Image (spheres, grey):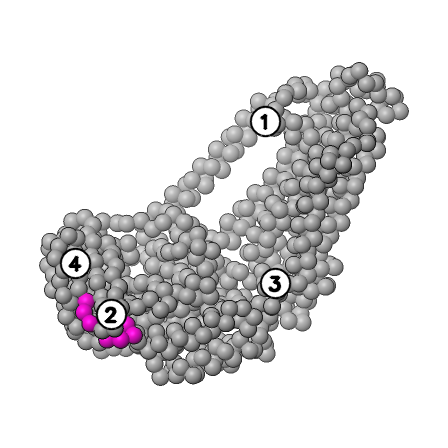
């Protein structure tokens, strides 16, 4: 029987592993499902300044009245000097304009003073006279906001676009015969809960219809281009319809890129978070302004989209637009033949003072001086026929009249030789975060319940003589297996400890003021508040952390304590112990309990006293842990009998009939 159970377990594990590997291989494949040859330019790429548009993006500014005042002063410098020097046609401010966190960094609410800073900076730097500033909300801009009409929705009154465009919208710029469309995707929750349950964005049916309507209004044409921008990566957006956000954006044949923020480089784990979605558009997450002070320079040059992420105050700034960097070539939207037939290398160069000179070098060739064409555009003649095969390196050297120097290089390929994006970037941008959170939560839930029920069932079979008692082996795994087995026979311990994780998947976690003055209820599968239902997303991640940081350690501590009590009863071990042994015995539970107290306190700071008192997730779990630990320390002898029928081994120390029924024990052994 043990072999059968093991075999079944291995078989199920192999199936799950095969499904996961298939999913990852399909995810990481580079093939695009988008239709080809629709938006590919046939314009000759020369040294002409036509068919060129450059623009900027800044994200996750997090203006705060409590932390890092330099965040504000340097943002003002960006709006004044950087925008003034680059003179972009458009600046995309892709959400989290303000921080909206309380002084302790735990609670969340909208602070009007932060929004005043944002408005005043844009006003004082005369940003409207310099560029078209397109801002959109992020989840921090939506913390504790009941709806668009709420007084807490300061985005409406203090942003540039909020009054006319409170949610998704688009702007179009026409230069000669080329139409550039910038379409903002607002996926903020409505209502917007306090943190942390505002991490995942959502597009409901109304907003999806609005986005589709905006797409329908764009003019189709071979020289028209659409840039999507928003705060949330597509991996962090759920939809209430069957249409996924990537499908919606991918159906727009003119859409070439979606730029976003939100993930803050995942704390530095993925500093360059880029990918080409299977729907046929690039997705580029921009690192935050808050800590990293980065912004993005982008250009559409003769139909080719190029970009570069730049550190604030790092001058000069330049961007090679032809030949385009190999990694970001989009074969479904861009025609490599146009580069192969081009006559000039094209570079945009900017600085706080006039550019003195720009020169380029390909591979190990000679340096070539570039000629200023118009504004920031520099060009140098070249013969692409010399570079038709494989990868090649283009190096650029820029100097301004004040002596600032910058050089960099990039790889290009004219034969379509592909480069691959990093696996971590693909996983961050191409997966479904909500699905991953669900898998982790329910996988951990199964791990903490199914084996417990299986062990209990096996015990019943052994006790009834239908299975042979396991042989005692000296190994760590078998030792813990025996401890969990003994714990599974104690009803007053077993049922609470297996029902708790099941309850987390079904029952309410807390009831409290989730949005402004509106009482709501949080479940793993969703949030009810202000007459709305928000499907479960980050709640699953929160539940997973609860299981991993609290319930699983509690399982091990309780099993170990029950086993120790079993030893006390069956072998009459003395209860007197040294202080050192007492500390070692009770320290693990003390650490778990203290950590949960801290988490409950943080939850109270985030959602208030009502949520703290009516909180099975955090507060009530402390009561559960205390009761279970107390019970396991003082289990009466009658609770040990069922385990002793299987696991009691007679020794020199006899057990009285009042302690354990010897006849039953001897019959079993």
Nearer to us: label 1 or label 2:
2
The residue sitting at 13% across, 62% down in the picture is 368
Where is residue 168? Give x, y as percent.
45, 71
CA–CA distance in space, label 1 to label 4: 66 Å
Confirm whether the magenta stretch covers residue 536. Answer: no
Residue 665 appears anywhere in the view: yes
Where is residue 433? Give x, y as percent.
49, 53
Label 2: how many residues lie within 10 Å, few (<14), some (14-19) or many (20+)?
Answer: few
N-terminal of the pair, mark 4 or mark 3, is 3
On screen, 47 above or below 283?
below
The residue sitting at 65% across, 29% down in the picture is 481
CA–CA distance in space, label 1 to label 3: 46 Å
Pick the residue in front: 170 or 329: 329
Nearer to us: label 4 or label 3:
4
N-terminal of the pair, mark 1 or mark 2, is 1
CA–CA distance in space, label 4 to label 3: 52 Å
Image quadrant assignment for residue 329: bottom left
Q: Secondary structure at mark 1?
A: helix
Label 4: how many residues lie within 10 Å, few (<14), some (14-19) or many (20+)?
Answer: some
Nearer to us: label 1 or label 3:
3
Residue behind mark 1: 5
Residue behind mark 3: 106
Residue behind mark 4: 361
CA–CA distance in space, label 2 to label 4: 20 Å
Q: Secondary structure at mark 4?
A: strand
Nearer to us: label 2 or label 3:
2
Q: Are marks 1 and 2 in contact (CB under 8 Å)?
A: no
Where is residue 26? Give x, y as percent.
38, 45
Residue behind mark 2: 403
Q: Secondary structure at mark 3?
A: loop
């Amino acid at each position: 029987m043990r072999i059968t159970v093991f075999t079944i377990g291995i078989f199920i594990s192999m199936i799950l592993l095969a499904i996961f590997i298939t999913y990852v291989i399909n995810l990481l494949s580079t093939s695009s499902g988008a239709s080809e040859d629709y938006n590919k330019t046939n314009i000759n790429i020369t040294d002409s300044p036509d068919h060129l548009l450059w623009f900027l993006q800044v994200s996750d500014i997090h203006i705060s009245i409590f932390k890092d005042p330099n965040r504000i002063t340097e943002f003002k410098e960006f709006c004044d000097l950087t925008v003034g020097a680059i003179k972009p046609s458009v600046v995309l401010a892709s959400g989290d304009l303000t921080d909206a966190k309380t002084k302790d960094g735990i609670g969340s609410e909208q602070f009007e003073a932060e929004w005043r800073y944002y408005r005043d900076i844009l006003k004082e730097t005369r940003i409207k006279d310099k560029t078209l500033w397109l801002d959109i909300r992020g989840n921090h801009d939506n913390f504790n906001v009941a709806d668009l009409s709420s007084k807490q929705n300061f985005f409406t009154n203090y942003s540039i676009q909020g009054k006319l465009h409170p949610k998704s919208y688009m702007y179009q710029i026409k230069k000669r015969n080329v139409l550039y469309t910038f379409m903002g995707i607002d996926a903020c929750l409505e209502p917007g809960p306090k943190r942390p349950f505002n991490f995942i964005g959502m597009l409901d049916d109304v907003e999806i219809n609005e986005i589709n309507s905006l797409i329908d209004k764009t003019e189709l044409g071979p020289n028209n281009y659409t840039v999507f921008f928003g705060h949330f990566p597509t991996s962090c957006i759920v939809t209430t319809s069957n249409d996924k956000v990537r499908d919606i954006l991918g159906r727009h044949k003119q859409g070439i890129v979606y730029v976003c923020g939100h993930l803050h480089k995942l704390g530095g784990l993925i500093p360059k978070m880029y990918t080409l979605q299977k729907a046929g558009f690039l997705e580029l997450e921009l690192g935050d302004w808050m800590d990293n002070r980065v912004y993005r320079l982008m250009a559409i040059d003769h139909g080719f989209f190029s970009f570069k992420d730049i550190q604030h105050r790092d001058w000069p700034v330049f961007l090679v637009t032809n030949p385009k960097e190999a990694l970001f070539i989009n074969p479904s939207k861009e025609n490599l033949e146009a580069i192969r037939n081009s006559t000039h290398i094209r570079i945009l160069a900017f600085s706080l003072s006039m550019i003195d000179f720009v020169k380029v070098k390909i591979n190990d060739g000679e340096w070539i001086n570039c000629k200023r064409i118009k504004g920031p555009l520099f060009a140098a003649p070249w013969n692409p026929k010399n570079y038709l095969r494989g990868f090649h390196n283009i190096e650029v050297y820029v100097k301004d009249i004040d002596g600032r120097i910058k050089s960099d290089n990039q790889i290009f390929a004219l034969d379509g030789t592909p480069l691959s994006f990093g696996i971590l970037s693909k996983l961050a941008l191409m997966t479904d975060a909500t699905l991953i959170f669900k898998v982790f939560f329910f996988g951990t839930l199964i791990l903490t319940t199914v084996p417990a029920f299986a062990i209990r069932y096996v015990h019943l079979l052994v006790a009834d003589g239908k299975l042979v008692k396991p042989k005692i082996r000296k190994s760590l795994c078998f030792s813990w297996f025996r401890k969990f087995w003994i714990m599974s026979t104690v009803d007053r311990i077993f049922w609470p400890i297996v029902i708790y994780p099941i309850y987390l998947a079904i029952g309410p976690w807390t009831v409290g003021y989730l949005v402004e003055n509106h009482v709501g209820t949080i479940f793993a599968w969703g949030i009810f508040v202000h007459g709305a239902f928000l499907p479960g997303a980050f709640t699953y991640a929160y539940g997973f952390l609860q299981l991993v940081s609290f319930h699983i350690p509690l399982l091990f501590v309780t099993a170990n304590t029950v086993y120790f009590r079993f030893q006390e009863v069956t072998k009459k071990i003395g209860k007197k112990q040294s202080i050192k042994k007492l500390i070692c015995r009770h320290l693990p539970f003390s650490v778990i309990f203290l950590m949960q107290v801290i988490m409950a306190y943080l939850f109270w700071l985030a959602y208030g006293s009502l949520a703290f008192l009516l909180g099975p997730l955090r507060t009530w779990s402390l009561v559960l842990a205390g009761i279970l630990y107390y019970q396991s320390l003082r289990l009466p002898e009658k609770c040990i009998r069922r385990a002793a029928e299987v696991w009691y081994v007679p020794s020199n120390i006899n057990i009285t009939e009042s302690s354990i029924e010897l006849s039953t024990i001897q019959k079993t052994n």
